Amino acid sequence: MFSYIDCLKNHNENANIFYIDYMDSSFIKMKEYHALHKYVEDQCIEKLVIGR
């Protein structure tokens, strides 16, 4: 998966890619739609404001 993400980023530096590993217990809450939406929205804002 990470190789695919790297490939996408190499071909489009503005790609918005979010990798969520549902096997990682810290992402369990993301299975609920509203939590997932907030996470993605916060990541987009962080990239725009901080430039990560």
Image: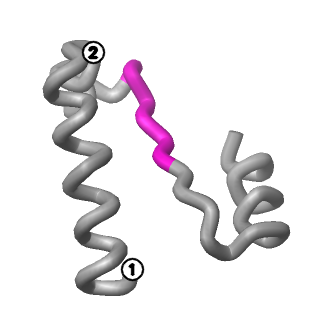
Q: Taking 24 as reference, is 9 left or right?
A: right
Query: What span is in magenta?
Result: 18-23
In magenta stretch: residue 51: no
Residue 8 percent across, percent down from the top left? 76, 57
Relative to the observer, which residue lies in front, 20 or 50?
50
Crowd around label 2: few <14 · some 14–19 · many ≥20 (10 Å)? few
Relative to 39, does residue 43 appear above or below in the rendering? Answer: below
Q: Quadrant of the C terminus?
A: bottom left
In the image, farthest residue toward the top: 32
Q: Which residue is mark 2?
A: 31
Q: Quadrant of the N terminus?
A: top right
The three-letter amino acid code for the residue at tag 2 is: Lys
Give the CA distance from mark 1 to mark 2. 25 Å
> Circle 2 — which element?
helix
In magenta stretch: residue 20: yes
Q: Which residue is mark 1?
A: 52
